[in-house]
Image (cartoon, helix red, strand yellow):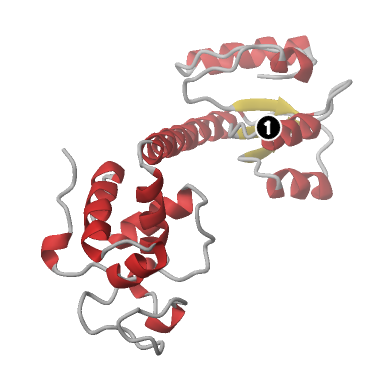
Amino acid sequence: MIDDDLSIRESLELLISSAGWSPALFASAKEFLDHSPTRDPSCIVLDVNMPGLTGLDLQRMLTSGGRRIPIIFVTGFGDVPMTVRAMKAGAFEFLTKPIDTAALLDAIGGAVRNSETLHREDEELANLRTSYGTLSQREREVMSCVVKGLLNKQTAYNLGISEITVKAHRGQMMRKMEARSVPELVHMALRLQLIEDTGINGSSMRRDDVASPSPATGSGQFPDSGASHGLGSSSEMPNRAG
């Protein structure tokens, strides 16, 4: 809870505590920024109009710093443009004073649940980065070709290695990334920002979206062998790592 009004902080502390949460109170945005951030799911109940850094200033700083914390704005001077700015910048809710206690508690409950989701997403992304960090340089090159829709023969040609070697690196890469399919691997690459989201799902990538021709044809035609998404035979797909 961040509000420069002591009476507001004290009254909301009692209200929030009575609902089973453990509020931390701050008199200013600077005081909050000087405090070590919690690693638990949480939200911020934030006054808009404060001396020094305003609530909107703090929201902008948190966003630019990559801190994803649901914010519930409260203000006695709310207007439509201010509300629009806050909501466009990702505010979870915008309430006006005097505060409707039921609405505030409901907003806090929703914001904490949203924070739990954000924490799970951040944890999943951290795990993806760890998995990607275990790949060798060659495995990363093979992964890059796979998520672009290249077949094994095309990948071998592009990297200057044999198709058997591609299959070996591909199997290792899929196991390390714990990817059960190419579409899942494409989704991982998108989350890691290794490729741009063009709106094309990995499982529906057209053959004419693939830039590199197969060395077996030399004319831009695609080889008949192998699955349409570079999977090859079913024996090529590794089982999900335990």
Q: Tell me the residue that label 1 is attached to.
A: 65
Vertical order, 121 against 202 (above or below): above
Q: Amino acid at mark 1?
A: Gly
Q: Which residue is situated farthest in the left direction here? A: 235
Whether residue 154 appears in this view of the structure is yes
Relative to 230, say whether 209 is above or below: below
The percent coordinates of residue 71 (x first, y second) are 63, 33
Point out the image quarter for the N terminus. top right
Position in image of residue 42 (x %, y %): 52, 25
Viewed as shown, does residue 81 lie left or right of 169?
right
Q: Quadrant of residue 96?
A: top right
The percent coordinates of residue 110 (x first, y second) are 49, 36
In the picture provided, is 191 more to the left or to the right than 67?
A: left
Residue at 44% from the left image edge and 39% from the top image edge: 125
Image position of 125 with respect to 149: above or below: above
Q: Residue at x 21, y 61 (%)?
A: 164
Q: Is residue 96 visible?
A: no
The residue closer to the viewer here, 15 or 86, is 86
Front position in the image: 141 or 182: 141
- Residue furthest to the right: 51
Residue 19 is situated, as x and y percent measured from the top left of the image, at: 47, 19
